[in-house]
Image: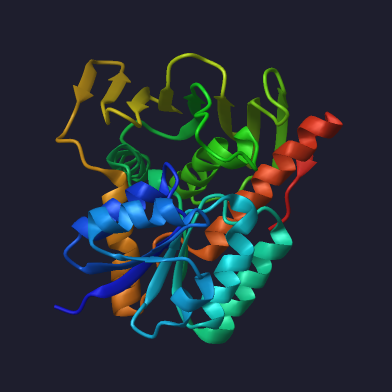
Amino acid sequence: MKKLNIAVIGVGSWGKNHARVFKEMEKTNLVGIYDVQLEKAKDLAKIHRARAFSDLEELLSMEEIDAISIASPTSTHGEIALKAIQHGKHVLIEKPMTSTLDEAEKIIDASKATNVIVSVGFIERFNPIVSKSKNLIESGELGELVLLSARRLGPYWPDRLKDVDVIRDVSIHDIDAFRYLTEKDPVSVYARGGKLRHSYLDYAEMLLDFGGGLTGFVESNYLTPHRHRKLMLTCEHGIVEADYMTQEYVIEDNEWLRSTKSSWQEPLTREMNAFADACLENTKPIVTAEDGIKALKIALASIESIETNKIIDLDF
């Protein structure tokens, strides 16, 4: 079986998981690991029997490497992705895709010019509860969908290098999930939020108007002591409450309460397998670069709404 040779760029709290999964997968070879802190790269490379790199250009110049996974700070995503694309490497970029729309657009243009695959790390797309929700909405089992809501709360992780706010860091997961579930882009957004304990936005509430009476609401923060990751659907004939973390799924309609919990599946493994398949088969990835830039556009509009206290119209 042909395998995808891949390297991981950035091995902080989340990059370590990228390396672990790519090492465990049958269809990938974890070839290299790069981090600006070489000792961190060396330590992880030793665990996974990969090569640690101190020079990013040297890693990208290696012909045997087919793809890279970028889990470095957001401010570095644009530059690293463009360099990788110029070297003909397929790219998986952790969310948010970039810091700015201009950077994201340059990545899309470069990928089209070189015919490499670019995907963005929206892990909840691969969460079984999102798949169940998608199936339920499409089946019409509970009638018309009228509201999606999500809560993504919990304390800030002090070991994470912070160069984005709570909206671009965590709310963006639900922005993408809502777009996927509805197969629509919002027409406007109104948001409120603030800086309670940090120098960046650390709590926010967003109201997304998808048109036709369909609304999405996202609450997120870095403040509450315990982590909550919930997805709720309000439909014409019932409601759904699902837990992103435990993957418990509860449906309540006018006849009964149904609670289901299948065997837990790691969304990250499903995400990495999908990326590897797209690269090996040269097919469109499940999450595209266009998905990444649209989610970023909505996130940035939400920040603008907070700063101006205005509804921001969206044009895609």
Quarter placement of the C terminus = bottom right
Residue 138 appearing in the image: yes
Query: In which quadrant of the rendered view does residue 32 lie?
Result: bottom left
Q: Residue at the spot x=42%, y=27% of the render?
A: 229
Instruction: Count numbered badges in the picture.
Output: 0
Query: In which quadrant of the rendered view does residue 48 lie?
Result: bottom left
* Position above or below: 133 against 253: below
Is 294 positioned to the left or the right of 46 in the image?
A: right
* Position above or below: 135 against 279: above
Q: Position of residue 95 (x, y in %)?
A: 52, 50
Quarter placement of the N terminus = bottom left
Q: Residue at the spot x=56%, y=29% of the render?
A: 218
Q: Position of residue 314 (x, y in %)?
A: 73, 49
Query: In which quadrant of the rendered view does residue 249 lie?
Result: top left
Q: Residue at the spot x=24%, y=68% of the render?
A: 28
Q: Residue at the spot x=57%, y=29% of the render?
A: 217
Is 254 positioned to the left or the right of 151 in the image?
A: left
